[in-house]
Amino acid sequence: MQLKPYPKFEKKAEEYFLSGYNDAETILKVILEHLGEEDPKFIKIATGLGAGLGRLGETCGAVTGGILAISYKFGRVSKTEDKWHCYELIRKFIKEFRGKFGTIKCSDLRGGFDKDRKVCVPYIIYAVRLVINIIENSINAN
């Protein structure tokens, strides 16, 4: 998938992450800003997902934050609404992320928590770029 860069939001993502937001919080915060729907309450739901689900090294927070962001835009509020379009976009996001980095597992990407958190910046920047592209492509397709 050819990705259009979004330097303004990619730079914000790096700044937020290096200032102390976790990876999942960072992705959700930046995507909400991109959508013009900033609300600090939403960042709270991403806190426990950081560093591979509560710092367990499981699914990367950049991935879970991306899933939250895509779900925020395309999820449903009623059980009668369609969920399959959202699922399709989530699968695309995960496939592309895994295709780029070989895994979505935090501990494999990071190589352990003893390393500087800066090692996560490329994953965060790519996730922001990928999520924005997926959202924009989906909006433009409809």
Image (cartoon, rainbow, N blue to C red):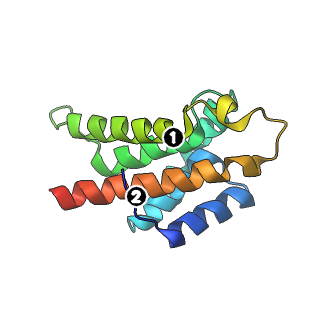
Mark seen at residue 63: 1
Which amino acid, mark 1? Val
Q: Residues within 10 Å of mark 2 (few under 14, many from 20)?
A: few
Label 1, secondary structure: give it: helix
Q: Quadrant of residue 52?
A: top right
Q: Position of residue 94 (x, y in %)?
A: 43, 36
In the rendered view of the protein, which quadrant contains the C terminus? bottom left
For discs 1 and 2, the disc positioned in front in the rendered view = 2
Which amino acid, mark 2? Leu
Q: Position of residue 106 (x, y in %)?
A: 64, 33
Q: Residues within 10 Å of mark 1 (few under 14, many from 20)?
A: many
Identify the mark nearer the N-term, 1 or 2. Answer: 2
Apparent side of residue 142 relative to residue 119 in the rendered image (left or right): left
Residue 50 higher or lower than 26, as above or below = above
Q: Which residue is mark 2?
A: 3
Residue drawn at (32%, 55%) of the image: 135
Choose between 38 and 108: the one closer to the eye.
108
Residue drawn at (52%, 67%) of the image: 9
